[in-house]
Structures are given as C-alpha cells and as structure tokens.
Image: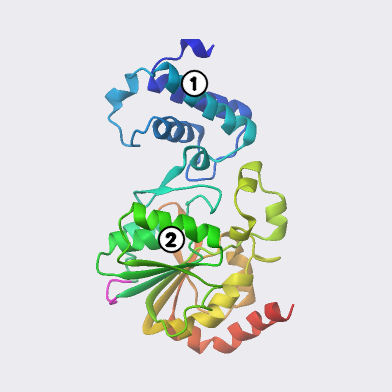
Amino acid sequence: MTAELASIIDFIRYGASRFSAAGLTFGHSHDNPIDEATHLVLASLYLPPDIPPAYGAGKLTAAERESVLGLIERRVSERLPVAYLVGETWFAGLKFKSDRRALVPRSPIAELIESGFSPWLDERQVDRALDLCTGSGCIGIALAEYNPTWQVDIVDISEEALALARENIVFQHLEGRVEAIRSDLFTALQGRRYDLIVSNPPYVTEDEYAALPGEYRHEPKLGLTSGTDGLDLCLRMLDEAADYLSDDGLLIVEVGESEHALVELLPRVPFVWVEFKVGAMGVFALERRDLLEHAADIRAAASVRRAA
C-alpha cells in the first residue's frame, strides 16, 4: 500500500489516516491528525511549516520515504509526541528544540506573548521579566524575542530541562538577554525583582495524571503533577511572588483545569481570568498589590501544603 505514496501531500494524507485509525490522542501543539501528520512530514524533511502549497507535489527520495514511514509507525506504536520524534516544535511563531527532558511547548500563554499582553502591559514599563518553571525555555525565550529591550530570567528545578532551555537560548541567539537559573521556584533568586512574572507550572492532579493517555507518559512527570488538586506549586508561588515583583509588578500563571479548585480555595483573591480566542484556558493575572492585600489568606492556604 505504501509503495503508491510519492508526494509530500501523499505522506501527510497517509499519516493522518494512520493516526486517526489508531485512535491517537492529540494535545501536544496540535489537536487533529492532519496537523500532526503535517508537522511530522515537513519537519522530517527539514521543511518549514509555511511551505508554499506547490511544494506539496514534491516527490520523496527512497531514503526520505523510509524515514517518514518509520516515524509515522513510531507515532502509532509508541504513542510518542511528534515533537519528540522530530526533535522540534513551534511556539509563539518560533521554532524550539524539543525532547523528553521537558514538556512539549503548548501553553495558551503564547497568544498573550504575541499580543503584547494587552491590555495588562499597555500602560506598564517592563525591563525585567521572569519565566518560572520554564521547562524547554519557550515562554521566557519568546518573551525576549518579542520584546527586544527586556532582560529575562528563566527558572526550573530540573537540570535536564534547563540544559534543553540553554540549547534553545543559543538556538534563538539570545545569550545576552536570557539567563537560565536552576532554582526551586524563587529560592535562588534572592535580591532580584521583576516587572512581570509568567509561569506555566505543573498543575495536573494525581488522579488526572493516572488517567492521562499514553502520549503524556513520555513527558517528565515532574513537569506535570502538583499534588492532589494540582495547586501545590501555584500556592507557593502566590505566597512568595510579591517579594520578587516590582511595586507595579504583574503575575500571570496558567493553572488549567485547577482553576476551579483555586477559586474555591481563595474566594476573596481577585484573580482575573484571561479570555483567549478559544475562550477561557485557566490562566490568571494578578497584581502585586492584590498579592499583598490578600497575603494572609494566601499564606494560610500555602502553609497547609507545607505542613502536609
């Protein structure tokens, strides 16, 4: 059957059909089999995602056919995310190296970066920004790329993730403006202040993790789970962030499906939930002054976690 496949379009169509028939889960940058197959085929041929349609008729060589077919079969049999198979993915319009050392970049925060965080930063001066729980470095590196005057620190507790993030800093030629720091949240950041802190921390509950499809089991669990309600790291962050924000500083954090648990736990904290093109995505914005005003409630909730 595969002997009849010849063009780029042929292999994309074949890959999409195989992925659909196999009942794969799509959630790592793509939400459908056609986009997944397009990513796999084009990346494996070292072609950009915005290739002109006319190139779709281009024929593959024998070696290229073997390589693409092998990757398609691995995607089906091993349930590996496409980004890990081809070693790259796209985030906020930028290409990043991607492998098992960190989660596949896929945060809706990309939309905020591309829109300049409007309206939250419209009247706000930003000189220094922090990407906390950076993983592959995608958020912090994109912050620096889109905002050439900013200095950006990217932080993670995982040395493996930071090694990948450092590769991505070099890949994007941002060595002079992005610094990768190993730290357990703010522990190694004493004395530093930021006008903007952005974070996509682990927020999957233990029950949710147990039910995740096979694709997610290839990612580091450290980057996914955060206690029984997914909020262990978020509460620590809320408790400590004010000390690392400038007076007019802003905190933006993704908590996904744990949004409801957070609102229930801290009902008086005025979280502003960001609306994206596809609707709410569990990302909140919070001013430093609100962190200070509700510090007692936040500290009480965080203390319970620390004592557990």
Question: Image height check: is 197 above or below 171?
Answer: below
* Sooner in the amino-acid sequence: mark 1 or mark 2: 1
Q: In the rendered image, which quarter is residue 213 located in?
A: top right
Kindly give the residue lying farthest to the left in the view shown.
149
Circle 1: residue type: Glu
Q: In the rendered image, which quarter is residue 27 located in?
A: top right
Q: CA distance from mark 1 to mark 2?
A: 44 Å
Q: Residue at x 34, y 75 (%)?
A: 128
Asked if residue 224 shows in the view, the reply is yes
Query: From the viewer's perspective, is 248 left or right of 252?
Result: left
Residue sitting nearer the eye, 286 or 77? 77
The quarter of the image holding the N terminus is top right
Q: Position of residue 61 (x, y in %)?
A: 39, 18
Q: Residues within 10 Å of mark 2 (few under 14, many from 20)?
A: few
Magenta region includes residue 231: no
Q: Residue at x 43, y 61 (%)?
A: 275
Q: Position of residue 254 (x, y in %)?
A: 51, 64
Residue wearing tag 2: 275
Residue wearing tag 1: 66
Asked if residue 108 shows in the view, the reply is no
The quarter of the image holding the C terminus is bottom right
Q: Residue at x 58, y 62 (%)?
A: 202
Question: Image height check: is 22 above or below 166?
Answer: above
The residue tagged with tag 1: helix, strand or loop?
A: helix
Question: Image height check: is 276 above or below 284?
Answer: above
> Magenta span covers which residues?
121-126
Q: Position of residue 193 (x, y in %)?
A: 39, 81
Q: Position of residue 246 (x, y in %)?
A: 38, 83
